[in-house]
Image: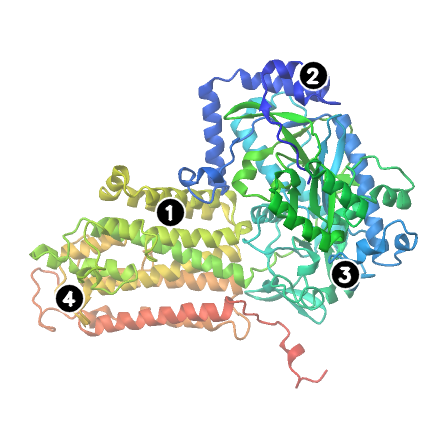
Amino acid sequence: MFAAPSTSSNMSQGNLASGGQWQSQGQGPNSLSGTVTMQLQNTLSSLSPDQLNRIFSLADELREEDGSYLEPRDSIRPERRSESGFDLMPLVVAGEEWARIEAGLIQRVRAWNLFLRDIYSGQEILRANVVPYEIVYADPNFHRGCARLPGVTASYLQLSAFDLQQDSRGQWQVVEDHLGVAEGASYALKKRQILRQIAPRLFDGREILPIEDFAIQVLDVLQELVREPDGAARGVLLARGSSDTHYLDHAALARQMGLPIVQGSDLVVLDSRLYLKTIGGVERVDVILRRLSTSLLDPVTFDRTSRYGVPGLLSCVRKGALAMANGLGSDLANNRALVAHLPAIIEYYTGEKPLLASPQVLEMRDVDVREEVADNRDAYVIRHAWQRGPSHEWIVRHMPPHEWNRFWQEIEAAPSEFVAHKVPVQTLYPSWTANGSNAAAVTLRAFALGQDRISSCALAWTGMASSLSTSVVQMTDQIKDVWILRGASTPSISVHAQAEEAPSRLRLTSRVAESLFWMGRYVERAELTARLLRIVQVQPWPMLDSIAARQRQSLWAAMAAVSGHAADFFLQQGPHAVTSQEIPFYLMLDREHAGSVISCLRSCRQNAENIREHFPPEVWSVLNRLYLQIALHADQASTEQVRMVLEDRSLHQEVITQLDELTGALEKHMLHNDAWHFWQLGVYAERSLMTILTLKEVLAPEIGGSTFIGPVSSVNLDLLLQMLAGQYAYRSLYHARPVAARVARLLLQDQEFPRSALFCLQNMRHALTSTLGDRPAKGADAPVMHCSRLITELNFIDIATYFPRGGENGSTLTSEDDLADMPTPEFPRKLTELTEMLLDFNVLISDHYLDHQVILREPELFDLSTPR
């Protein structure tokens, strides 16, 4: 992570033509890569300002839809945005130059692999005094528990990365090794995808090595590690989750590989085998692609405070029942002090001189080195030997005297923990952003797959090498696409034979099922709130002293109940009461109100962020765009434009339309597997509950703690049908004015109306049986049985019992219709009973399938009374 001096400068086309500051070996105007760079510069120069503005605007829109922006773009604070903007100019690497990089990195990977194999076995290199003992033994990433682990003696490194920079002479140097966890490949894939979409002319006639098969290449490496026949190995990607800086990278890679992202709490070790806790029981795991350091993986053996690991994980590896990529203990090779001895390490194991150099690293444990750095501190960068990130890298010349004095005391107290190197002078490369053309230092990250292959999927970014750990917004701006020109022959890739019978997918984890279940509920709640408000908002305010206002009080009661309030919420007075003018904002855009549309969408999106790998990009794009649009309206709520869309209810309709689009995207693009069924389960559970609740409050509103029962006007019933999108369903069935009994039958018992309680419950049962089978395991069938009881209860409701004919409950019919327009007092009590049963169903779902409940398929293994 070497920091370049601040050398960014304006660069005209004339500077490019003459080589300018960015000219270097293989990069001058007479080289292939230099010629391509000049052609790209000419192409961009030929674009009009309007064309460039459109390109950059489209780039912003695509990144916003993809989730690169976690807030609306217009509300992101300027200091949190990159000053440069989206870079259109790729880093061009000629084929011959890339071949030299490949050869040097393959040599480096092999040397590191031999070093790790030796350190965790005979430690011959330490006995030969090639590497000092103290560097290895003082590093907390050296784990004695990883010695002589089976399965890693052949290869410790399946996916590694190396950061390279060009010095002032144009020589590529490796400035950082990532041998425990290699991240960032998905950033390169996303940059290429966006650049192809917004500026396809740049690719015309270019012979560029493809990068789209990176995830497949990683899968090949994992399958070779496990060596299961026909690719039957079951793998997962183990990470911290959404709290990790690189979570979006993890999610994108996992989705492209078809692997679930799991956290330590999703896994359990039983009898020295690793299992995934799913909604259908535990399922064996054969291989892990880890995104965690070794120290965090097993709190029993390594860091006891780790909240991210799995107790007993090391025992699975030691028994040979689990493969790990990269091998446990490989994080040791990230120690920067080892780089000072890397030429000797390479020569010791391979008998060769390094093909790629590294800048000279000075070990601060040497007194002479400390004196040199102290006397010439402005010329040096100091870094921690084994801790990574910008907070562990210090450009000394930027430090004020008092801070330097304090920092120097830390170095003197533990000098072996620090290394130093001189501030490098890097080659500058052209960039083209919305601010124009300029030159900037570039870091190139190359990815190694196993020991013999360097992927053509490479990542480059401008600025400090350590900037890859900054926010996604900034990284999307700083990243450059890397074009490796086709030159040298590409090594062939072995393809595994296809299985005659497709293997089954891993079941859904309980944690992910819970997120999907609640996402479905939040989406349905947001839609229903918008639907009801669209109708209720134009009704007379219930506090007005008028006949019309009193007649519509039941509609406002339904609106209050659905949004999480008491039915008489809008009749209350006092300092915390909501006025009629505040209602649209309160129910649509108020972040402080948990039942508002924006709060529901925010909760839905937060859950989606935690399980990004389960959603196709098309689904995430719709959900993210909708949330950002609503959030922007909330941020601008005081403007006339927002007040207008709230008043004319066009925002309400836009929410409903986009939620319909989300449903279509889910139906079309999402696998109809466990994830789909738990989403559907949440949607229908919320819909059935809200339908019954709305029906109850319109027919028998609870005002002031008492249930009011009286004749229900056909106008109110018609508005109720509009609120629940049932007007056409009713009229196509009855061809007459709404009558309370018929409306109740439609909303409760109609098997074809998508919002009826019966329709919802039947789909809930279908989702459960599709996920768990018609005969779930013993103990897992309680939700299915409860759902079936609810269906039976609904089917046996005799509507005529609760809506007696005229004169039986004191009412007088005013038309020829022989059905009553008001219920008996028992009807709201029946609806309350149904509501409680639905709430009990949600509890059963949580108890049996969510909250990391595990059903063991072999319970006799844990029954001490069973003879062995």
Q: Quadrant of the C terminus?
A: bottom right
Secondary structure, mark 1, is helix
Location of mark 2 (residue) = 29
Left or right: 561 in relation to 825: right
Secondary structure, mark 3, is loop
Crowding at mark 1 (Cα within 10 Å: few <14, some 14-19, many 20+): some
The answer to whether residue 126 is above or below residue 804 is: above
Given this view, does label 1 or label 3 mark the residue nearer the observer? Answer: 3
- The alpha-carbon separation of the residues under discs 4 and 1 comes to 34 Å
Q: Amino acid at mark 1?
A: Leu
Given this view, does label 2 or label 1 mark the residue nearer the observer? Answer: 2
Q: Residue at x 80, y 53 (%)?
A: 135
Q: Position of residue 732 (x, y in %)?
A: 24, 51
Q: Amino acid at mark 4?
A: Met
- The alpha-carbon separation of the residues under discs 2 and 1 comes to 52 Å
Q: Quadrant of the N terminus?
A: top right
Say whether marks 4 and 1 touch (CB < 8 Å): no
Q: Amino acid at mark 3?
A: His
Q: Residue at x 52, y 28 (%)?
A: 198
- The alpha-carbon separation of the residues under discs 3 and 2 comes to 50 Å
* Marks 3 and 2, the one that precedes in the sequence: 2
Q: Nearer the viewer, residue 114 or 154?
A: 114
* Marks 1 and 3, the one that precedes in the sequence: 3
Location of mark 3 (residue) = 143
The answer to whether residue 272 is above or below residue 722 is: below
Say whether marks 3 and 2 touch (CB < 8 Å): no
* Marks 2 and 1, the one that precedes in the sequence: 2
Tag shown at residue 736: none
Q: Nearer the viewer, residue 433 or 701?
A: 433
